[in-house]
Image (cartoon, rainbow, N blue to C red):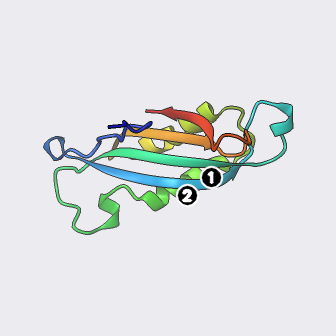
Amino acid sequence: MVKPVVEPLKIADAATGLRHVFVRDLVLDCNIGVHQHEKGRVQRVRINLDLGVTEGDGVHNDRLENVVCYEDIVTRVRAITADGHINLAETLAERIAAVCLQDPLCRSARVRVEKLEVFDDAGAVGVEIE
Protein backbone atom coordinates (compact mmCIF):
# COMPACT_ATOMS: atom_id res chain seq x y z
CA MET A 1 0.00 0.00 0.00
CA VAL A 2 1.36 3.42 -0.99
CA LYS A 3 1.36 6.03 1.78
CA PRO A 4 0.07 9.49 0.89
CA VAL A 5 2.68 12.21 0.50
CA VAL A 6 0.91 14.34 3.11
CA GLU A 7 -0.31 12.62 6.23
CA PRO A 8 -3.73 13.86 7.35
CA LEU A 9 -3.60 15.70 10.64
CA LYS A 10 -5.63 14.04 13.37
CA ILE A 11 -6.91 16.99 15.33
CA ALA A 12 -10.45 16.09 16.28
CA ASP A 13 -10.45 14.16 19.53
CA ALA A 14 -13.57 13.75 21.66
CA ALA A 15 -11.52 12.51 24.61
CA THR A 16 -9.65 15.82 24.82
CA GLY A 17 -12.58 18.00 23.74
CA LEU A 18 -11.08 19.08 20.42
CA ARG A 19 -12.80 19.50 17.10
CA HIS A 20 -11.21 20.06 13.70
CA VAL A 21 -12.06 23.25 11.84
CA PHE A 22 -10.54 23.53 8.37
CA VAL A 23 -10.31 25.64 5.24
CA ARG A 24 -9.38 23.84 2.03
CA ASP A 25 -7.81 25.16 -1.15
CA LEU A 26 -8.32 28.90 -0.62
CA VAL A 27 -6.69 30.46 -3.70
CA LEU A 28 -5.78 34.14 -3.42
CA ASP A 29 -3.63 36.67 -5.19
CA CYS A 30 -0.63 37.70 -3.12
CA ASN A 31 2.37 39.95 -3.70
CA ILE A 32 4.99 37.45 -2.55
CA GLY A 33 8.55 36.51 -3.35
CA VAL A 34 12.19 37.42 -2.74
CA HIS A 35 13.31 37.63 -6.36
CA GLN A 36 13.24 40.88 -8.29
CA HIS A 37 10.91 39.43 -10.95
CA GLU A 38 8.39 38.60 -8.16
CA LYS A 39 8.28 42.10 -6.69
CA GLY A 40 5.51 44.41 -7.79
CA ARG A 41 3.30 41.65 -9.16
CA VAL A 42 0.85 39.24 -7.66
CA GLN A 43 1.07 35.47 -7.67
CA ARG A 44 -1.62 32.96 -6.90
CA VAL A 45 -1.20 31.12 -3.61
CA ARG A 46 -3.21 28.21 -2.26
CA ILE A 47 -3.79 28.14 1.49
CA ASN A 48 -4.97 25.20 3.60
CA LEU A 49 -5.73 25.47 7.30
CA ASP A 50 -6.30 22.83 9.95
CA LEU A 51 -7.27 24.18 13.36
CA GLY A 52 -7.57 22.28 16.62
CA VAL A 53 -10.45 23.96 18.42
CA THR A 54 -11.55 23.39 21.99
CA GLU A 55 -15.20 22.51 22.42
CA GLY A 56 -15.41 24.34 25.72
CA ASP A 57 -17.30 23.30 28.82
CA GLY A 58 -20.78 23.95 27.49
CA VAL A 59 -22.65 23.21 24.33
CA HIS A 60 -22.48 25.62 21.42
CA ASN A 61 -26.30 25.95 21.37
CA ASP A 62 -26.23 26.26 17.59
CA ARG A 63 -24.86 29.81 17.99
CA LEU A 64 -22.02 31.18 15.89
CA GLU A 65 -20.46 33.15 18.75
CA ASN A 66 -19.76 29.85 20.57
CA VAL A 67 -17.54 28.38 17.84
CA VAL A 68 -14.58 29.38 15.67
CA CYS A 69 -16.06 31.09 12.62
CA TYR A 70 -14.24 29.97 9.48
CA GLU A 71 -15.70 32.98 7.63
CA ASP A 72 -13.83 35.28 10.05
CA ILE A 73 -10.64 33.25 9.57
CA VAL A 74 -10.91 33.47 5.76
CA THR A 75 -11.58 37.22 5.95
CA ARG A 76 -8.45 37.69 8.06
CA VAL A 77 -6.35 35.56 5.69
CA ARG A 78 -7.58 37.63 2.74
CA ALA A 79 -6.57 40.81 4.58
CA ILE A 80 -3.06 39.45 5.21
CA THR A 81 -2.53 38.58 1.54
CA ALA A 82 -3.82 42.02 0.49
CA ASP A 83 -1.64 43.95 2.96
CA GLY A 84 1.43 44.53 0.81
CA HIS A 85 4.51 42.60 -0.23
CA ILE A 86 5.68 39.53 1.70
CA ASN A 87 9.08 38.04 0.89
CA LEU A 88 8.68 34.47 2.15
CA ALA A 89 5.94 31.86 2.12
CA GLU A 90 7.16 31.05 5.65
CA THR A 91 6.32 34.60 6.76
CA LEU A 92 2.86 34.37 5.22
CA ALA A 93 2.22 31.04 6.96
CA GLU A 94 3.37 32.44 10.32
CA ARG A 95 1.12 35.50 10.00
CA ILE A 96 -1.85 33.31 9.13
CA ALA A 97 -1.15 30.98 12.08
CA ALA A 98 -0.89 33.98 14.40
CA VAL A 99 -4.33 35.32 13.46
CA CYS A 100 -5.88 31.86 13.80
CA LEU A 101 -4.37 31.45 17.27
CA GLN A 102 -5.78 34.82 18.37
CA ASP A 103 -9.14 33.11 18.75
CA PRO A 104 -9.27 31.86 22.35
CA LEU A 105 -10.89 28.58 21.24
CA CYS A 106 -8.10 27.76 18.78
CA ARG A 107 -5.44 25.53 20.38
CA SER A 108 -3.36 24.58 17.33
CA ALA A 109 -2.97 25.62 13.72
CA ARG A 110 -1.43 23.86 10.76
CA VAL A 111 -0.98 26.21 7.81
CA ARG A 112 0.10 25.25 4.31
CA VAL A 113 1.02 27.97 1.81
CA GLU A 114 1.66 26.98 -1.80
CA LYS A 115 2.87 29.27 -4.57
CA LEU A 116 1.16 27.98 -7.72
CA GLU A 117 3.09 29.69 -10.51
CA VAL A 118 6.79 29.29 -9.69
CA PHE A 119 7.79 26.40 -11.94
CA ASP A 120 6.14 25.27 -15.16
CA ASP A 121 6.86 21.64 -14.32
CA ALA A 122 5.61 21.72 -10.68
CA GLY A 123 2.05 22.16 -9.52
CA ALA A 124 3.10 24.07 -6.43
CA VAL A 125 5.93 24.88 -4.06
CA GLY A 126 5.60 26.11 -0.53
CA VAL A 127 5.75 25.49 3.16
CA GLU A 128 3.70 23.95 5.92
CA ILE A 129 3.95 24.95 9.57
CA GLU A 130 2.22 23.82 12.73
Label 1 near label 2: C-beta < 8 Å?
Answer: yes
**Residue lying farthest to the bottom in this orientation:** 62
How crowded pointer 1 is (Cα within 10 Å; few <14, some 14-19, many 20+) is rated as few
Residue 40, horizontal then vertical, whole percent = 84, 43
- Quote the CA–CA distance across marks 2 and 1: 6 Å
Specify the label residue 75 is tagged with.
Answer: 2
Residue found at x 62% / y 52% = 79
In the rendered view, tell whether residue 32 sits above or below residue 78: above
Residue 34, horizontal then vertical, whole percent = 76, 30
Kind of residue indicated by mark 1: Ala
Specify the label residue 122 is tagged with.
Answer: none
Tag 2, which secondary structure?
helix
Residue 35, horizontal then vertical, whole percent = 81, 31
**Residue lying farthest to the left in this orientation:** 15
Please identify the quarter of the rendering in which residue 125 is found.
Answer: top right
Q: Is residue 36 left or right of residue 105?
A: right
In the rendered view, tell whether residue 27 sits above or below residue 2: below
Tag 1, which secondary structure?
helix
Residue found at x 86% / y 32% = 36
Kind of residue indicated by mark 2: Thr
Say whether residue 57 is visible: yes
Specify the label residue 79 is tagged with.
Answer: 1
Please identify the quarter of the rendering in which residue 86 is found.
Answer: top right
Q: Nearer the viewer, residue 36 or 120?
A: 120
Residue 56, horizontal then vertical, whole percent = 21, 50
Residue found at x 55% / y 48% = 47
Q: Nearer the viewer, residue 21 or 67?
A: 21
Q: Quadrant of the C terminus?
A: top left
Residue found at x 36% / y 36% = 3
